[in-house]
Image (cartoon, coloured by chain):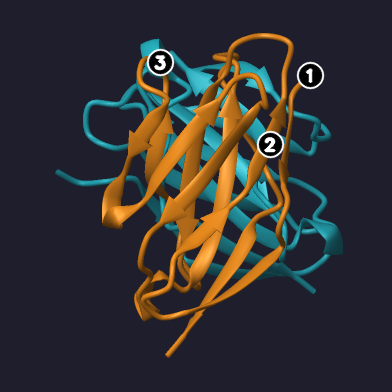
Chain colours: A orange, B cyan
């Protein structure tokens, strides 16, 4: 079985400040890792993915994430946030057994 | 290039009724997955369809059923609705060979009263 833990349920941050959203997973086998963003009253949009190769992954809208196998983590970062980054962020893992398993989400609120 | 589309956008039903939700996958995709997202929670996997057959199922009762058509579009049916079925239902499409790489539609908001 695999599970995903997002360590912060809410992250308030000021505009132009950096942000890090933490994600840990548990799995006995190799996994694929994803970050999705959900804006209010919308579906999920894929931010970035780690399938293999370089552990530093760059995504859309200036986001990046680093895969750390020894710590089973996949933390998401952005060096400078905008008001428009206010949203819910979900970490997800797949063991290539068809389904995605999601964390509970992190609400990011960007303030001016 | 059209993305994943879902209909309807919103739906209100009464306890005990039945509901059908629809999904059209992203162009070129042949696999459809359904997820339930309760308020304030992450999405939970319901099932996945490929070649018109259920490929894998999550921990949901038999009241939840689905179908995939030859054009790869899909339906989610829920019978005997309960108040707890109120949620955002998300459809995701992918390629069979990369079924973990899923692209989501905007969802259908179901409210059961």
Residue found at the far bottom of this picture: A112
Residue lying at 42% horizontally and 90% vertically, measured from the top left: A112
Q: Tell me, yes or no, whether the two marked residues, 3 and 2, touch with CB atoms within 8 Å.
A: no
Q: Tell me, yes or no, whether the two marked residues, 1 and 2, touch with CB atoms within 8 Å.
A: no
Q: Earlier in the sequence, mark 3 or mark 2?
A: 2
> On the image, numbered disc 3 is attached to which residue?
A52
- Pointer 1 chain: A
In this rendering, the answer to whether A8 lies above or below A10 is above
Query: Callout 2: helix, strand or loop?
Result: strand
Residue B13 appears in the rendering: yes
Q: CA distance from mark 1 to mark 2?
A: 14 Å
Q: CA distance from mark 3 to mark 2?
A: 17 Å
Residue lying at 71% horizontally and 62% vertically, measured from the top left: A9
Q: Are marks 1 and 2 on the same chain?
A: yes
Q: Are marks 3 and 2 on the same chain?
A: yes
Q: CA distance from mark 3 to mark 1?
A: 21 Å
Task: Tell me residue A44's x, y (percent).
Answer: 46, 52
Task: Tell me residue A104's x, y (percent).
Answer: 71, 52
Q: Which mark is residue A1?
A: 1
Q: Tell me, yes or no, whether the two marked residues, 3 and 1, touch with CB atoms within 8 Å.
A: no
> On the image, numbered disc 2 is attached to which residue?
A24
């Amino acid at each position: 079985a695999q599970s995903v833990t997002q360590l912060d349920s809410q992250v308030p941050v000021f505009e132009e400040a950096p942000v890090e959203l933490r994600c840990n997973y548990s799995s006995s086998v190799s996994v694929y890792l994803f970050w999705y963003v959900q804006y209010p009253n919308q579906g999920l949009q894929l931010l970035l993915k780690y399938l293999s190769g370089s552990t530093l992954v760059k995504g859309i809208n200036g986001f990046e994430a680093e895969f750390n196998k020894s710590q089973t983590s996949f933390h998401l970062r952005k060096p400078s946030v905008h008001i428009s980054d206010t949203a819910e962020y979900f970490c997800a893992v797949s063991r290539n057994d068809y389904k995605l398993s999601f964390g509970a989400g992190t609400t990011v609120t960007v303030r001016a | 290039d059209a993305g994943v589309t879902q209909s309807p956008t919103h739906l209100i039903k009464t306890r005990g009724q039945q509901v059908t939700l629809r999904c059209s996958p992203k162009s070129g995709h042949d696999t459809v997955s359904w997820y339930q997202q309760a308020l304030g929670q992450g999405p939970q996997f319901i099932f996945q369809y490929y070649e018109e057959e259920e490929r894998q199922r999550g921990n949901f009762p038999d009241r939840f059923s689905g179908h995939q058509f030859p054009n790869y579009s899909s339906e989610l049916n829920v019978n005997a609705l309960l108040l707890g079925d109120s949620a955002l239902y998300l459809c995701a499409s992918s390629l069979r060979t990369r079924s973990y790489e899923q692209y989501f539609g905007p969802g259908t908001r179901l409210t059961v009263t």
